[in-house]
Amino acid sequence: MTKMKKTEFRPDDFVVYPAHGVGKIMSIEEQEIAGLRLELFVISFEKDKMTLRVPTHKAADVGMRGLSTPDVVTKALETLKGKAKVKRAMWSRRAQEYEQKINSGDLLSIAEVVRDLHRADDQREQSYSERQLYEAALERLTREVAAVSGTDEAGAAKKVDEVLVGRAA
């Protein structure tokens, strides 16, 4: 009964939790919950000042994953260079789709949202909800680019911004 299941994540690993983005595993602890001993990942999302405890056996089910490979980051940045694809659906329907892409935790889907909602200075104003979704997607993308490339967020933000601005030129 005490056989340890080897977990693919270890303390100090950066992971992506779909609903919250990039976090860092601080420790793996055991807790008794409702009479059951559970092994939990303790994940810190420093930027949000939040700690999450995820049962190790549920990590895959909730979509928790390791950081993207540098190749995927490159593809995500390439995605930003593409032309915005904005469907002619009602905003509420599009907003829902964007939200799903952001919360999927999939870096390429997140990059698509950034691409589709990015506005150059001379373009029309964004609505408040568009801006919120854009900023959420941009932050997720930037944090993962930073974690994968080992730079700080400011450096990653500059890199992402250069790609977006370069696209308009």
Image (cartoon, rainbow, N blue to C red):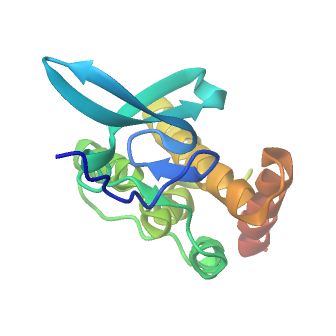
Q: Residue at x 69, y 63 (%)?
A: 148
Give the image quarter of residue 52. Answer: top left
Is the C terminus in the top left, top right, bottom left or bottom right quadrant? bottom right
Residue for point 81% across, 63% down: 159
Give the percent coordinates (x, y) of residue 122. Answer: 72, 53
Q: Is residue 111 above or below residue 19?
A: below
Provide residue 48's location: percent of width, then percent of height: 59, 25
Q: Closer to the camera, 126 or 78?
A: 78
Residue 124 seen: no
Q: Is any part of residue 64 visible from this angle?
A: yes
Residue drawn at point x = 36 percent, y = 29 percent: 30
Horizontal side of 86 relative to 58 (left or right) equals: right
Q: Residue 108, position in %: x, y?
A: 48, 69
In this view, 26 is above or below 162: above
Residue extending furthest top? 34
The spot of residue 11 in percent (x, y) is 58, 45
Q: Nearer the viewer, residue 2 or 11?
A: 2
Position of 117 relative to 71 (above/below) = above
The reply, left or right, for residue 165 in relation to residue 107 is: right
Q: Residue furthest front?
A: 2
Number of disc labels:
0
Residue 60 falls left or right of residue 150: left
Q: Nearer the viewer, residue 14 or 155?
A: 14
